[in-house]
Image (spheres, helix red, strand yellow):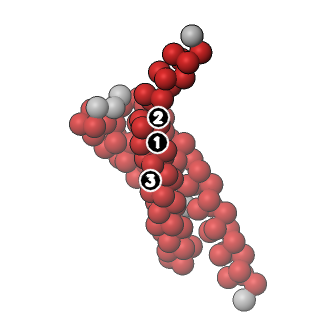
Amino acid sequence: MTQSIINKQDILQPYRESLDVINMQILALLSERMKVCMKIAEIKAEQDIPMMQPQRITSLLDMLRDKSTDFGLRPEYTESIFQLVIEETCCREEELIDQLLNEKVKK
């Protein structure tokens, strides 16, 4: 019986390995996205642009929801993932902008 279960688990191994690769790609893309957002934060600090851009977030989420079904994903799923991504990005942007503005004041 145990041998049968182990063999059945082996069938899943190639798929799990594929998922591991995809998960690393997702992490790499999230990292790249964050780098771009940090550059945007620098520009916002330099140009005195407000960190929060609610209209941009709304239009981004709307666009992602609309495109979700093209990728076979539920819009609610996509929106919840990107809300987390955006929340973390906003926190990191705010930290960087505060840091840059504090450095500017000290000069």
**Residue positioned 62% across, 54% down in the render:** 91
Q: Within 10 Å of the Cα at label 2, are there few (<14), some (14-19), or many (20+) other Cα atoms?
A: few
Counting residues from the N terminus, which is met first, the one under dot 3 or under dot 1? 1
Q: The N terminus appears in which quarter of the rendering?
A: top right
In what element is the residue under mark 1?
A: helix
Choose between 98 and 83: the one closer to the eye.
Answer: 83
Q: Amino acid at mark 1?
A: Glu
Q: Which residue is mark 2?
A: 13
- Does 34 appear above or below 103? above
- Are the residues tagged 1 and 2 within 8 Å (C-beta)? yes
The residue labelled by disc 3 is 25
Task: Please name the residue that numbered disc 1 is placed on.
Answer: 17
Q: Nearer the viewer, mark 3 or mark 1?
A: 1
Residue found at the far top of this picture: 1
Check disc 3: other Cα within 10 Å, few if <14, some if 14-19, many if 20+.
Answer: few
Q: Residue at x 37, y 48 (%)?
A: 60
Q: Could you tell me which secondary element the residue under label 2 belongs to? A: helix
Residue placed furthest toward the left: 70
Residue in front for this viewpoint, 36 or 31: 31
SS at badge 3: helix
Q: Nearer the viewer, mark 3 or mark 2?
A: 2
